[in-house]
Amino acid sequence: MSESRKKVVVFRKLPDDLLERIRAQHDVTVADPRRPDELPRFRAALHDAQGLIGSSFKLTADDLASAPALEVVSSISVGIDNYDLAYLKQRGIVLCHTPGVLTETTADTVFALVIATSRRLVELSALVREGQWTRNIGEELFGWDVHGKTLGVLGFGRIGQAVARRAALGFGMPVLFHDPFDVPVPSELAGRASRAPFEEVLARADIVALTLPLAEETRGLMDADAFSRMKQGAIFVNGSRGAIVQEAALLDALDSGHLRAAGLDVFAVEPLPQDSRLRTHPKVTPLPHIGSATHETRRAMAELATDNLLKTLAGQPPVAAFDLSKV
Ligand SMILES: NC(=O)C1=CN([C@@H]2O[C@H](COP(=O)(O)OP(=O)(O)OC[C@H]3O[C@@H](n4cnc5c(N)ncnc54)[C@H](O)[C@@H]3O)[C@@H](O)[C@H]2O)C=CC1
Ligand SMILES: O=C(O)C(=O)CO
């Protein structure tokens, strides 16, 4: 066996051909820690693992501490909130992720929620399915135009800008965005998207879309005060992470009639607990975290994550390492 073979733990399903690519170079343990029957094998495999690849599992500092030989964590996601960044940095472990390849698909999902909530698509489709379409619908079931409304984008990064392009170029929506960094307005959005402080975006947008990362500074950012600053009758859409939203405050804003509707792809606890009021609230369109969930995009993410893993283990620069230097 070659000296360069390393130990890799695959903790989320990978396409067979990608698994074989890794197996051709390294010794692989496949174990899904979200499954109670596989958790002990996952934990045991960490002890001599040099590489980890997977997603949707919170890797704590304790998990990482039990992997003293670890060189790389390759996440099959762009979001890196499941990892203890300070600990990874301190240990010099490379963290890789999958930016870019999921941008357009996730923006499609966010914009689908904008349309679904505004035009009440899911609610009205259910009415047909349930056999309640027995006469022409009345104005109590009318929706709200999307075209011409002002879209507020919180987080003007890759996905935020892709949502803004759909809104401005496809639907004639003026875009207001907030981002703490000096992100330039792309040329195709010149004159159609403008920067504004957080509170101003909330106060002026008809529809607010959340496309920023979960970090300690953004946890709970959308609280009662933030929702109260939104326009009466506005719509809130979340395509980033549930924990950025104080869900009880969102429910209050919907119950009081202050907000018209919410479209949510992500939740503080996933899968969404059965007893969550967000699951059945008539003004909420909930999705099961499908932002990037198309065949093409999940394949591209798995390929990029595999490339990242193999390159790092080979001592080469990965395609997409998360920059831990500013942590
Ligand atoms: N629903 C889903 O399935 C998916 C969700 N996501 C989430 O979307 C997030 C964004 O992804 P990308 O656009 O690729 O990342 P990105 O890094 O390109 O963009 C994020 C932007 O948010 C900005 N930002 C940071 N803190 C902020 C704050 N307090 N207020 C306003 N803006 C702030 C950053 O400066 C950056 O420009 C990911 O971190 C992930 O959590 C990503 C893909 C799929
Ligand atoms: O990539 C991410 O961060 C996701 O949430 C799933 O695509």
Image: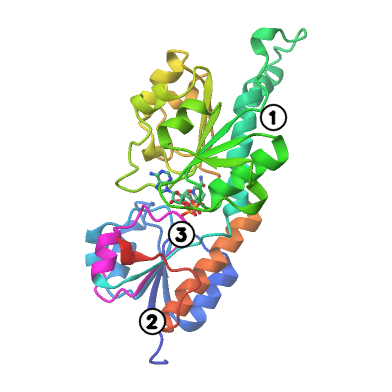
CA gap, disc 1 and disc 3: 40 Å
**As displayed, is residue 213 above or below residue 72?**
above
Q: Nearer the viewer, residue 192 or 76?
A: 192
Query: Regarding mark 1 in the picture, which secondary structure is present there?
Result: loop
Label whose residue precedes the other's in the sequence (3 or 2):
2
**What's under tag 2, amino acid-wise?**
Lys
CA gap, disc 3 and disc 2: 19 Å
Which stretch appears magenta? 67-90
Q: Nearer the viewer, residue 59 or 183?
A: 183
Query: Regarding mark 3 in the picture, which secondary structure is present there?
Result: loop
Q: State the residue lying farthest toward the bottom.
A: 2
Q: Which mark is residue 6?
A: 2
Seen at 58% across and 37% down, the residue is: 175
Which residue is tagged 3? 12
Seen at 60% across and 61% down, the residue is: 299
The answer to whether mark 2 is within 8 Å of ligand 2 is no
The answer to whether mark 3 is within 8 Å of ligand 2 is no
| Residue 163 placement: quadrant | top right
Where residue 249 appears, x then y in whole percent? 36, 24
**What's under tag 1, amino acid-wise?**
His
Where residue 305 appears, x then y in whole percent? 50, 67
Which residue is tagged 1? 147
Tag in front: 1 or 3 = 1
Q: How is the image coloured?
A: rainbow
